[in-house]
Amino acid sequence: MSRILALILLLFVLLFSNCAHDFPEDDFSLTNQVVFNLINEEGTLKSGVNCAWEVDYAMVIISYGKDRNRKTNTYFLSSYIENGVLYTEPLTLNKLRRGEYYKLDEMLLYADDDLSQDNPIGDRLISAAPHDGSKFGMRARRPLSVQFEVDAFNTTEVDLSVFCFEGANPEDFGFVWFQPSVTVVKQKWFFGDFCTSSFNDYTGSLYDLGGDLTVDMSAIYLIELYCDNNNDGIFYDDELIGNFSNEEEYPSGIVAPVSVIYPDDSYNENHFEIRLFVYMKVINGFGYVNVGNLYFEDDNETLYKTPIISRNLQNDEAIVHGSDNIYDFIIGNCNIEFADFSFDI
């Protein structure tokens, strides 16, 4: 009898163990969709007009990770209206690890005047979501203070209030660095190549997962952006604005330029530092190595390798992006024409 009971118990344990592996809660490679339901609030600035009808697409800025060392991505989503409610097309995101979460940082809705669908420069900002605690945020049912997770089973729906932007002060929305008359979001695009004759040493690395190993590989890189808040020429750790990387998308074969987004205070001259880290071989395996820094002021499109406080234009060649508005860089000995700047390793 005891042997039969033991066999039953063993079968139960095996059955439970096998079933446990079928549950996807701990599978962080899973993706699912997020849809934003945008509530056009009453009493908006365009009296008697529902400005939602003018919206063509949304620019969505989302940060993710743990409370410290979060990363930021920008997405452009087409929009549509159904039963009087403005929706974005679904956004597919990965399920995050325990302790990590997504946070919706900005929701900006545009009329696509230049028919680009993904470039707010030249387009009209129609409406936006106000931040919690701002003037409009106090009037909104769903202000912009939204954290969310991606569920393994269900589509995530995020309800969000938006107000028409025409005539509004940016302070009313809580983003004091937005200006209706200029580019709403300052951003710079980067794309890099990593060249090494020791490419076979990268077997098992993220480069290997992303495709064939070659002498010239699309770089996996991380950009840290800092702002010199007190203009003393030193960029401290607590002056970090954000991290921007292509690491998450690289293994899937998606190699796209990285967008670096930053606030430019129009009332002061702001000094910025870009710290460029490239994923490469280190003593104990693979990791990010700081290959060099770049500097720029305000929304200036020209980059330099020295900060303004010590810059000598005779010895520091100006770096400008190409006709595609992307700063193309090379790391190592690459035989590539038209690169905008390079760092040796």
Image: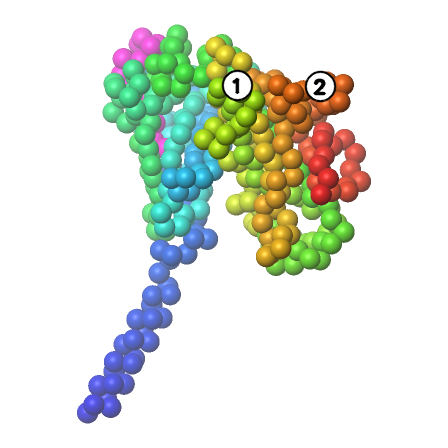
Specify whether 8 is left or right of 324. left
Image quadrant assignment for residue 18: bottom left
Name the one closer to the observer, 99 or 149. Answer: 99
Task: Give the residue drawn at x 48%, y 15%.
Answer: 265
Badge 1 element = loop
Residue 253 image offset from top left, x and y in percent? 60, 48
Kindly identify which residue carries mark 1: 231
Q: Residue at x 38, y 32 (%)?
A: 104
Question: What is the crowding at mark 2: few (fewer than 14 residues within 10 Å), some, or many (at least 20)?
Answer: few
Q: Quadrant of residue 125?
A: top left
- Image vertical order of residue 170 relative to residue 307, above or below: above
Q: What's the residue at 38%, 35% (across, down)? A: 103
The answer to whether residue 165 is above or below residue 261 is above
C-alpha gap between disc 1 and disc 2: 18 Å
Count the numbered circles shown: 2
Residue 140 placement, left or right of 35: left
The residue that disc 2 covers is: 312
* Magenta range: 36-48
115 and 120: which is toward the camera: 120
Q: Residue at x 43, y 36 (%)?
A: 63
